[in-house]
């Protein structure tokens, strides 16, 4: 069914390309013409700050990824966005977790040994609350001893929810009982979670950059997402922001602007659903991956790359997120941002947010080709942008370890 749909879309795209006027295309020497963003989509694109610092999973370098510790750190360090991969539980709670399986980033082998190989979407959130999502980091082969902290175990790290991430962005933290357990209750309509003002909050208000993850394993996640954004007051279509400055009084203010939410997906089918729901009115990124999947880039041909760009433009994405090489293992990805590829994307009017940056060598190589960075070390990216005089507002560079200590870790 899905393959047939994509085939039909490809045919429609080819026909539309051959029949469209020059006004709808960039005049280039390419055999396949690059489609360009409409003025309306350019307006939505510009909700997002230039040279955006996108805290990939909060941080996967300084703290256990996608946890309270990672996101509180990213907020206080001065990232513009808290990046999150979304999945949905059996009882309709939107999770923030990257992998389909929870074996890498939790103690699920100990708590649910018979279900350890089951996808996250097959669990209820009440079941997932029993997992420890922090201790693994201290023992991971990619964690150097100087980054391990006992507090990632003693201050229990939970599998986060989308609501958690929004609350962290708003300066909150989880409310816990005397035993350090998060306070929650289950009702007939779902869950109620309690939060409190974070005493270590330093006033930054980042946005969220959220990926609809593995739609085939999380059917209906896009529609659940719009309901949750509505409930939490983060859908700018129904509740437009009243502020437009990305920085305010030396602090990040993206979370108080119309750029507060950026959607992202690798899935062409998910992009079509997001287009149908949001009509292009919320900034959206189409992510590129080189592989053999139906939505992947299969070769190094210019025409192939242009077709993927055009699919994004035609379906109301304003950003492309290509993978880049040179990351620190395990994040060393295929190269999809050669200079000629960056030129094609920019010809379309789309902007480029590559993933993921792990070191300053990558930043130096790609900064002139991109408009923001998915970064595992927001501290380094902020310092890099300041040194290049590309970020003259917002928080100054801060020491990553000091920020963690100030947060109580």
Image (tube, rainbow, N blue to C red):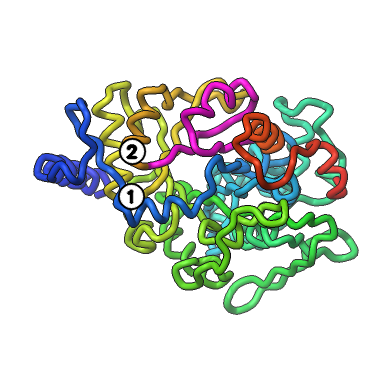
Q: Is residue 374 magenta?
A: yes
Judged from this view, the residue extending furthest toward the left is 19
Q: Secondary structure at mark 2?
A: loop
Residue 56 falls in image quadrant? top right
The residue lying at 78 percent from left, 67 percent from top is 196
- How packed mark 2 is, by other alpha carbons closer than 10 Å (few <14, some 14-19, many 20 or more), is some
Left or right: where does residue 284 sit relative to residue 303? right
- Residue 269's mark? 1
Left or right: where does residue 45 sit relative to residue 198? left
Q: Position of residue 354 (x, y in %)?
A: 49, 34
Q: Is residue 130 magenta?
A: no
Asked if residue 8 is positioned above or below residue 383 in the image, the reply reads below
Residue 387 falls in image quadrant? top right
Residues rendered magenta in the picture = 350-376
Q: Position of residue 152 (x, y in %)?
A: 81, 44
The residue lying at 32 percent from left, 21 percent from top is 300
Judged from this view, the residue extending furthest toward the right is 178
Q: Which residue is mark 2?
A: 295
Left or right: where does residue 249 sit relative to residue 342? right
């Amino acid at each position: 069914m899905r393959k047939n749909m994509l085939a039909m879309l490809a045919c429609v795209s080819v026909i539309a390309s051959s029949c469209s006027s020059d006004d709808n295309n960039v005049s280039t020497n390419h055999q396949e013409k690059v489609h360009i963003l409409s003025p309306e989509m350019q307006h939505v694109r510009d909700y997002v700050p230039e040279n955006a610092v996108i805290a990939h999973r909060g941080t996967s370098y300084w703290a256990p990824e996608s946890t309270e510790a990672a996101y509180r750190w990213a907020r206080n360090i001065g990232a513009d966005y808290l990046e999150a991969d979304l999945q949905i539980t059996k009882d309709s709670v939107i999770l923030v977790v990257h992998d389909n399986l929870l074996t890498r980033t939790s103690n699920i082998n100990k708590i649910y040994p018979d279900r350890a190989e089951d996808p996250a979407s097959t669990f209820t959130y009440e079941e997932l609350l029993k997992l420890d999502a922090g201790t693994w980091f201290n023992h991971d082969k990619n964690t150097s001893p100087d980054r391990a902290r006992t507090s990632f175990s003693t201050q229990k790290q939970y599998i986060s929810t989308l609501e958690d991430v929004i609350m962290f962005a708003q300066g909150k933290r989880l409310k816990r009982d005397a035993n350090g357990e998060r306070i929650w209750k289950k009702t007939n309509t779902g869950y109620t979670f309690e939060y409190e003002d974070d005493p270590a909050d330093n006033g930054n208000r980042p946005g969220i950059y959220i990926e609809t993850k593995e739609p085939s394993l999380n059917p209906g996640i896009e529609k659940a997402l719009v309901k949750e954004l509505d409930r939490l007051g983060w859908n700018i279509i129904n509740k437009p922001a009243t502020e437009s400055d990305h920085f305010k009084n030396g602090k990040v203010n993206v979370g108080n602007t119309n750029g507060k939410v950026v959607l992202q997906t690798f899935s062409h089918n998910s992009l079509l659903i997001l287009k149908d729901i949001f009509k292009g009115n919320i900034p959206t990124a189409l992510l590129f991956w080189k592989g053999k999947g139906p939505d992947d880039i299969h070769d190094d041909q210019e025409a192939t790359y242009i077709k993927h760009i055009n699919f994004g433009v035609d379906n109301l994405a304003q950003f492309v997120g290509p993978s880049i090489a040179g990351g620190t293992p395990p994040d060393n990805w295929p190269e999809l941002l050669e200079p000629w590829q960056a030129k094609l994307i920019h010809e379309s009017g789309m902007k480029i947010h590559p993933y993921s940056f792990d070191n300053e060598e990558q930043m130096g190589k790609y900064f002139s080709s991109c408009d923001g960075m998915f970064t595992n070390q927001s501290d380094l990216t902020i310092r890099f942008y300041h040194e290049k005089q590309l970020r003259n507002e917002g928080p100054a560079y801060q020491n990553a370890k000091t920020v963690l200590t100030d947060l109580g870790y």
